[in-house]
Amino acid sequence: MIFDRRRSASGLRAPVLVTRFLGWLIARPRRAKLSISIIFDTAPVLMMNLLGMAGYQLLCTCTVSKAVQYGVAALLSLFCIGVFVACGLYRPLLRYRDTLIIFPVLGASLAAAGTIALGVLAIAPAPNLLLLIGVVWLGLMAQMLAWRLIGGALLNIAVRDISPNVTHVAIYGAGRAGVALAEAMEKDDTLNVACFVDDNSHLHNRTLHGVKVRSYAALRDLAARGRLGLVVLAMPSASPARRAAIINALAELEVRVETAPTLEEIISGWRRVSDIRAVSPEELLSREPVEPDMALLERELRGRTVLITGGGGSIGSALCRAIIAHAPTKLVIYEMSEFALYSAERELRELIDARGGRIQLVCLLGSVLDKPAVARAFEAHRPDIVYHAAAYKHVPLVELNPIAGADNNIFGTLNVALAAQRYGASKFVLISTDKAVRPANVMGAAKRVAEKLVQALGKNTGGPSYAIVRFGNVLDSAGSAVPLFREQIRNGGPVTVTDPGMVRYFMTIPEAADLVIQAGAMANGDGDLFHLDMGDPVNVADLARKLIRLSGFSVREPGIGGGDIEIRFIGLRPGEKLFEELLVDGASTPTGHPRIFRADAGVMQWRDLEPYLEQLTHIVAEQNVDGLKSVLHHLVESYGAGKIQTAGTGNVRSLSGA
């Protein structure tokens, strides 16, 4: 039927006949559309010229035949169209116009009316002729402007209705940022703003920017019926925790989710409101930030020389960025990977230049196992504070290469810690891991030995203030699960997860870096062991499901039909366990920061450690894997205990110790 109607994602209806005609019109070549635009202008021009002729007769009290009226009106109309063409009125594309089209219409119609007025006044002036021409001109301009605005709006609707590539968008946030985003999307033929969504019930079913404001329940219904392709979160001033709550709710829908920049990004000039981007995994787990003790950090870092080993890694580079904000005199990066060092240097130099360029940046390429190179770095730069982040962290790889992993994590730490003592550093902070607690793998056991070394050195008098900061997994760090998940989703799956019950503690990179610096500043000097509040444990399979849904795909799992991307469970790899713990066998005490705790852990004396270090030196030289594991079992009593964990024992999180 001619008057059948189709419903868009927003609920608006458009007559099929009109949509088809406008679609046909859009497909015409440029010259044909130019001719149609001239025809649409000719009608109001001719009508207003005829009215002008009738008014002129009344003013002149003269009689003119109909043929003359029509002839003069036709000639004047042709003249007006010629003026419009000369003024460039038909150059812009109609469907990309907005209210600013009033200016070319105003200019072109004024040029035509002014020229006619001058001609008429010169040939046959009459009383009130200028008033008549003004009225005719206003009527002409109003008609020309009206059909352009209406036509442009209809064409935009038609393009979105007939195009199979249009994405129907819901904007979450009916505020200024949401409206600005809708205005930007209007100029993109591939996007159609279907509705706004807001938590404020007083706004529901109201109209904003031509579309309705809906509730989350209505959004969920639209997504379930396949009426939406994208949801954009446009709440730049919302707190991280609030944004995380909304994003986690949206992750339950099978629709792609993106976000507008935060208020900080907009104010800093890094992004505009219209610069939407994919949701980062960090935003899924963001918590309300706790303000650091800025006075403490300023005393700790301002004017100091700071050295960071592993400064090109995820945590190391985040530490560099955070430290730069507190104006040290010199920042020394010691990194084994050439590419990581190059990337970090480029980013940090830009950051330093943006802050006035008063911080000296030194980038050193070397391994922490190269004892002479470490000594040269310390002798040349005499750092006040050392953050030791260099380590082998990938559990299955270290399990397959146990000698290399233990050598780097134990003796690399020892080399840097002793250099800090020898060259007068005031503080040494070891970045440790929750895998050092009841370790089920060589990596974790070696990190626990490194902790024991630092604790023993901290008990000696006259050296630096030694401290250890222990925390869990960092989202989006190199080699972690999240970048792998995203790559697998981009490739169409499958997304590989170790086990349905695997649980991990996660923290965002910036939060971890800030808390490490804060904890290091609290160190008393005797080998303090700090652990960070990692929040609630996260089921890794659930995290994978959310990332798949936020990317706009449905999940396919074993035993469940359908779905776009499969989650495949591959089983535990060497050295892995289902649950990680931050502390065991003891108690931890709070500090001045609500997310930093001081652990009560047993400390070995240096004289007791030395025999084991001598054994390990020979074991590494001889590549004796069995000997290595035997020494690790003696040094780390709980080594291997993590392997027997089950779902009933993995939620221990507020205990302390080795």
Image: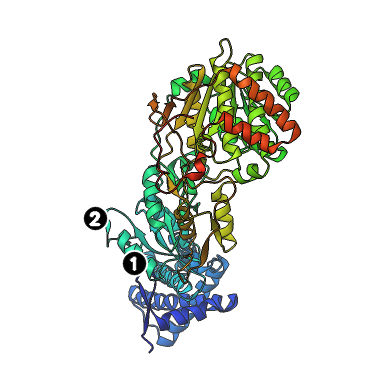
Q: Can residue 238 be seen in the rendering of this structure?
A: no
- Residue 121: x and y in percent read 45, 67
Disc 1 designates what residue?
221
**Residue drawn at x 69%, y 37% as measured from the top left:** 403
Q: Compare marks 1 and 2 and give the one earlier in the sequence.
A: 2
Q: Residue furthest bottom?
A: 1
Check disc 1 and give the amino acid type.
Asp
Q: Is residue 129 above or below residue 345?
A: below
Q: Secondary structure at mark 1?
A: helix
Q: Quadrant of residue 477?
A: top right
Q: Can residue 68 be seen in the rendering of this structure?
A: yes
**Residue drawn at x 58%, y 39% as measured from the top left:** 314
Q: Secondary structure at mark 2?
A: helix
Q: Nearer the viewer, residue 578 or 344?
A: 578
- Residue 524: x and y in percent read 48, 17
Disc 2 designates what residue?
202
